[in-house]
Image: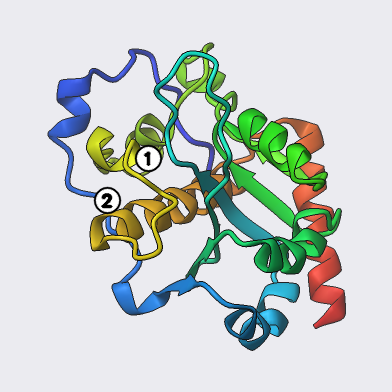
Amino acid sequence: MEMPQQTTLLSKEHIRALPAFRNLDTDKILVIQTPQQCLSIQNELYQTPIFGFDTESKPTFKVGEKSTGPHLIQLATLEKAYLFQVTPEILVFLKPILENEHQLKVGFGLKNDLISFRRKGIEPKSLIELSKSFSSFGYNAQVGVQTAIALLFQRYFIKSKKVSTSNWSIKQLSPQQINYAAADAYAALLICQQLYHQKILSTQTQQQIARILEGSTDKA
């Protein structure tokens, strides 16, 4: 069934009045800090065809100050979210996944992520930017994850500016940071899945996802 077209843009008031978006349960959110933890999840990560994807960085406040991020890298499946606290060793572990053309990474605002990774010597492949996929709803400009969740699922995706601009380079992330980071990646995957099933994505992206999914089925 085709998704009905949106004729009027959603107001902030309308979005806030929707039922709250439900994130993954806390026991399904894994914070990864060591190479040993990476190895324990390596097989499940390598077998995943599509990830919800996002990064977080410690904010910069001074003019001309360059970010040293990303400080957190989020990958999400429909069952789990993996939050990688960045170290040189963890970047080495993630590089083959990020550069794998046969594993899609879907999210919002990925242009800045691409620049950050290139500074780290990583060239991510198969990134799918979702923010421009909502013209059929009347949105010709880029759409954020909050509006996308409201449009597709009629849920309010809470975005805390206080949390988003917090220090993501600290060793011990707060429960609020962990929940926020996991939700961003998890929601991106749900959005991509819904757009794909409703055939709203561009023809090229629809075909790219279909090829990846068919390839993963063949390997199973």
Q: Residue 142, position in %: x, y?
A: 52, 19
Q: From the viewer's perspective, tell me whether residue 219 is left or right of residue 26.
A: right
The C terminus: image quadrant: bottom right
Would residue 52 appear left or right of 29 to someone viewing this image?
right
Q: Which of the 4 image quarters holds residue 201?
A: top right
Number of numbered discs visible in the structure rendering: 2
From where the camera sits, is residue 194 visible?
A: no
User: Going 82% across and 64% down the picture, which residue do you hit?
Assistant: 214
Residue type at numbered disc 1: Ile
The local secondary structure at tag 2 comes to loop
Identified at 45% across, 74% down, the residue is 30
In this rendering, the answer to whether 157 lies above or below 111 is below
Kind of residue at disc 2: Phe
Give the labeled residue for mark 1. Answer: 149
Sequence-wise, the earlier of marks 1 and 2 is 2
Q: Looking at the image, can residue 205 be seen?
A: yes
Q: x and y percent of residue 151 in the render?
A: 37, 33
Give the answer, above or below, for where 74 lies relative to 43: above
Q: Residues within 10 Å of mark 1 (few under 14, many from 20)?
A: some
User: Residue 125 appears at what percent x and percent y?
Assistant: 81, 46
Do callouts 1 and 2 mark residues in contact (Cβ within 8 Å)?
yes
Q: Nearer the viewer, residue 197 or 112?
A: 112
Q: Nearer the viewer, residue 89 or 186?
A: 89
Which residue is painted at 29% across and 20% down in the image? 10
Q: Which mark is residue 202?
A: none
Question: Pointer 2: what residue?
Answer: 21
